[in-house]
Amino acid sequence: LDNRTRWNSWYKMLVVLLDKREQVEKYIQNHEDDLKEDVLSFQDWKKLCTIKDFLAIVIASELEEPEALEGNRRDCNTMEKQRSRQQ
């Protein structure tokens, strides 16, 4: 496997994880006692979103498709706005 394949796999995994965030948080809530400290905080979600955005830039630059980046930025911005409304 080359490095591009591995980064692409990480990127795809993060896209799915962030898309399923609500379900993951519900699972964490339901199994909090079993998971103990292995839970994702808001800061963890933010870091994952930042990593996904960075990988999107790397992958898009390799593919020379920068227009693919806009949707990714919107996803993380939406997450920030939703968090602000909840507080």
Image (spheres, rainbow, N blue to C red):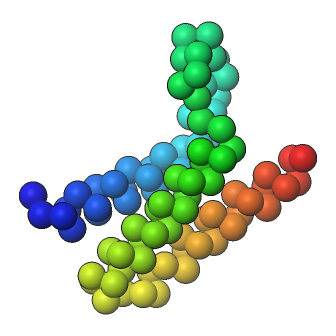
Q: Position of residue 8 (x, y in %)?
A: 29, 62
Question: Residue drawn 60% across and 48% down?
Answer: 45
Question: Residue drawn 65% across and 38% down?
Answer: 41
In the image, 43 versus 68, the foreground residue is: 43
Question: Residue drawn 33% across and 84% down?
Answer: 61
Q: Is residue 8 visible?
A: yes
The residue sitting at the left extreme is 1
The residue sitting at the top extreme is 33
Q: Position of residue 59 (x, y in %)?
A: 33, 74
Q: Is residue 5 rendered to the left or right of residue 1?
A: right
Asked if 22 appears above or below 27 in the picture, the reply is: below
In the image, 19 versus 59, the foreground residue is: 59
Q: Position of residue 15 (x, y in %)?
A: 46, 56
Question: Residue drawn 46% across and 87% down?
Answer: 67
Quarter of the rendering occupied by the N terminus:
bottom left
Q: Is residue 84 rendered to the left or right of residue 59?
A: right
Q: Position of residue 68 (x, y in %)?
A: 44, 80
In the image, 73 versus 42, the foreground residue is: 42
Number of labelled discs?
Answer: 0
Q: Is residue 19 visible?
A: no
